[in-house]
Amino acid sequence: MAISSLLASLSKCSMEAKRSSTVSGVVVAFLLGVLFVSPLINAKSFDFFLLVLMWPGAYCSQSTCCMPTTGPPKNDFFVRGLWTYNSDTGEAVTKCNGTSFDVKQLSSLMDDLHSYWSNIKCPSNNGIGNWKSTWKTYGVCSGMNETAYFETALQLRTRVDPLYLLNKNGILQSSWKLYDISDIESAIAEGIKATPVLRCSKGPWGYFQLYEIYICVDKDGKSIIECPVKPRFTCYRKVLFYPFDNEQPHNISTANPIQMPISVE
Ligand SMILES: *[C@@H]1O[C@H](CO)[C@@H](O)[C@H](O)[C@H]1NC(C)=O
Ligand SMILES: *[C@@H]1O[C@H](CO)[C@@H](O)[C@H](O)[C@H]1NC(C)=O
Ligand SMILES: *[C@@H]1O[C@H](CO)[C@@H](O)[C@H](O)[C@H]1NC(C)=O
């Protein structure tokens, strides 16, 4: 008798506890909801683009690289991305609402994509995975449709034409020559009428080498602008501009055998 009344009171007790935990659960969910929703309300939309161009010669000299299944890319700078950024937070704006990736939307751009937005990662691939992830991460935040987004990035690359600007200033691909990073910067700055940000990586024989060029672009995708916020990378004063063999991308035996992490400040 005593036991059953104890059990009864226990079960009553636990039911009350359950009800009150449900109530507090609702309160907690509500509070969390408010907490989770408010950053979304304040979420900053993108207000400028970072055009990232990469030098495949540097990529191949620091890691193994492979010929795309679609054939040799150009011996030139590739587009790595047209990234959506916010100048207040200094952060990328990514993975907005958006449409899914449809490679058919890019059919008119295929030749240029294979030439200048190529993926030389191993194993050999056709580049589509790379474009898809760029679209889903950044493109969907750009306010452009898929065709326009990729076309804008390719056109910007053509307009900047860093290889032309460097060659014009006597900065030629070389496996041994060291160039002043300030000469590289001014060659590009003069051409685009804005200051680029250069990213280096560790190249052969422990030297730094030119790896990527970051250029800021207005959110209309048309005008090149001074960067509202700048990414910061470490370079030495003298760097290599290591050659890219686009017909035969392969492991370069002279490369530093120790894989150095890319130095970012
Ligand atoms: C996301 O999509 C919804 C509905 O389609 C729309 O109301 C909202 O404005 C979109 N948000 C962004 C950040 O594009
Ligand atoms: C994409 O956007 C461009 C520029 O706004 C427009 O000319 C084109 O018709 C659009 N394409 C599609 C498939 O909506
Ligand atoms: C490149 O290096 C990888 C791993 O070190 C090796 O498996 C591959 O056979 C090499 N390829 C060439 C072309 O030397």
Image: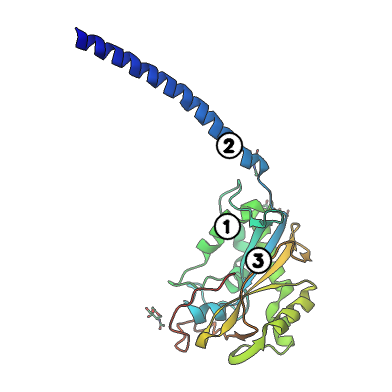
Report which residue position mark 1 lands on: 104
Q: CA distance from mark 3 to mark 1?
A: 34 Å
Q: Locate residue 24, reporting x and y percent.
A: 47, 25
Residue 189, image quadrant? bottom right
Q: Earlier in the sequence, mark 1 or mark 2?
A: 2
Q: Identity of the amino acid at label 2?
A: Leu
Residue extending furthest toward the bottom: 176
Mark 2: few/some/many CA within 10 Å (<14, 14-19, 20+)? few
Q: Which mark is residue 35?
A: 2
Task: Classify residue 222 as left or right of residue 200.
Answer: right
Q: Earlier in the sequence, mark 2 or mark 3?
A: 2
> Is 84 situated above or below 56?
above
Q: Residue at x 38, y 21 (%)?
A: 18
- Which tag is nearer the camera, tag 3 or tag 1? 3
Q: Nearer the viewer, residue 61 or 198?
A: 198
* Disc 3 CB within 8 Å of nearest ligand 1 atom: no
Circle 1 — which element? helix
Q: Identity of the amino acid at label 3?
A: Pro
Q: Locate residue 229, reporting x and y percent.
A: 71, 62
Q: Locate residue 160, reporting x and y percent.
A: 73, 73
Q: CA distance from mark 2 to mark 3?
A: 30 Å
Check the picture and name the quadrant holding the N terminus.
Answer: top left
Circle 2 — which element? helix
Residue 77, image quadrant? bottom right
Q: Earlier in the sequence, mark 3 or mark 1?
A: 1
Q: Locate residue 121, reporting x and y percent.
A: 48, 72
Callouts 2 and 3 close, C-beta under 8 Å: no
- Which tag is nearer the camera, tag 1 or tag 2? 2
Report which residue position mark 3 lands on: 231
